[in-house]
Amino acid sequence: MTEQSNSSTRGYIELSGPDSRKFLQGQVTCDMTTLSQDQVIYGAQCTPKGRIIFLFKASCDEQDNIILETHSSIVETAIASLKKYAVFFKTEIKQIDGHSEALEITDLQRLRNGSADVTADTTDMFIPQMLNLDAQGYISFKKGCYTGQEIVARAHYRGAVKRRMHHLQLTASTLPTPGAEILNPAGKTIGNIVSAAVAEEQTIEVLAVLADKSSDSTEITVAGQSYHVSHLPLPYDIPSGP
């Protein structure tokens, strides 16, 4: 089965106005001062409790407007969340049409890169380290305060992350729903599905957050369906401490 381009799963948010960069600097996990026309950056906006609202890739145009690419299902939630904090800043936040890229990244390619999507089904579920964002350059631990920063920093410096995202292969043809609970053979919840994509006929690949003590599970159940699990490598190392 050929994996098709899934550009329709992407949504775009534009922030324009003189305070846009300053506003985002106090809201997101990445250092917005490093963003330029030649340098894209990746980040997340979190709740005050450190849970991810949405993930994004940020770029800027010649007018220094900031473009956030995210999952299309979360655009409205993301805009509403940003606007809630933007009332004291000179910035306009709106959805815009997609930006064409020379090479579209498919859902399967994104998954194999170890890069999760946060969707309308999984918003407010995970802290950044659960999705390995600390291994992928999404978090600056030197930039100062932002919403949710205290929780993210505590997890980093105290090594309190007990769940991490893993790349799994399952023999199946139907994709599990993002956010679905993962059970072990005893029926105990050990994690959640993050992203899923068809790899080939009767084979799917998923990114799944698993409890550390269950990270080597070879049999799981999702939504009443049992799966045999093969563990696949991620293209980066998961940090073991600060």
Image (cartoon, rainbow, N blue to C red):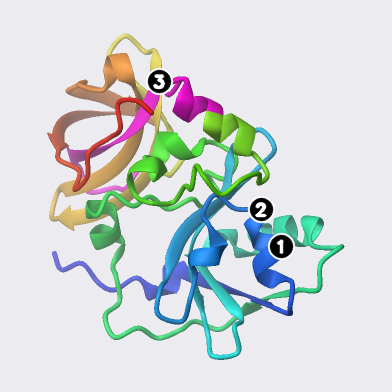
Out of 91 and 6, give the one closest to the viewer.
91
Q: Is residue 35 above or below residue 102?
A: above
Q: Residue furthest top?
A: 186
Q: Is residue 26 above or below residue 21?
A: above
Residue 165, given in percent of the width and then of the height, sits at 33, 35
- Return the residue at label 3: 162
| Nearer-N-terminus badge (1/3) | 1
Answer few, some or many: residues within 10 Å of disc 2's Cα (few below 14, many 20 plus, some between 14 and 19): many
State the CA–CA distance, disc 2 to disc 1.
7 Å
State the CA–CA distance, disc 1 to disc 3.
32 Å
- The residue sitting at 51% across, 35% down in the picture is 127
Q: Secondary structure at mark 1?
A: helix
- Return the residue at label 1: 23
Is 34 on the left or on the right of 220, as rendered? right
- The residue sitting at 40% across, 44% down in the picture is 133
Q: Secondary structure at mark 2?
A: loop
Q: Which mark is residue 27?
A: 2
Is 141 on the left or on the right of 107, as rendered? right
Question: Looking at the image, do the residues carrying marks 2 and 3 touch, with CB atoms under 8 Å apart?
Answer: no
- The question of residue 60 being in magenta is answered with no
Residue range (magenta): 154-176
Residue 96, given in percent of the width and then of the height, sits at 60, 81
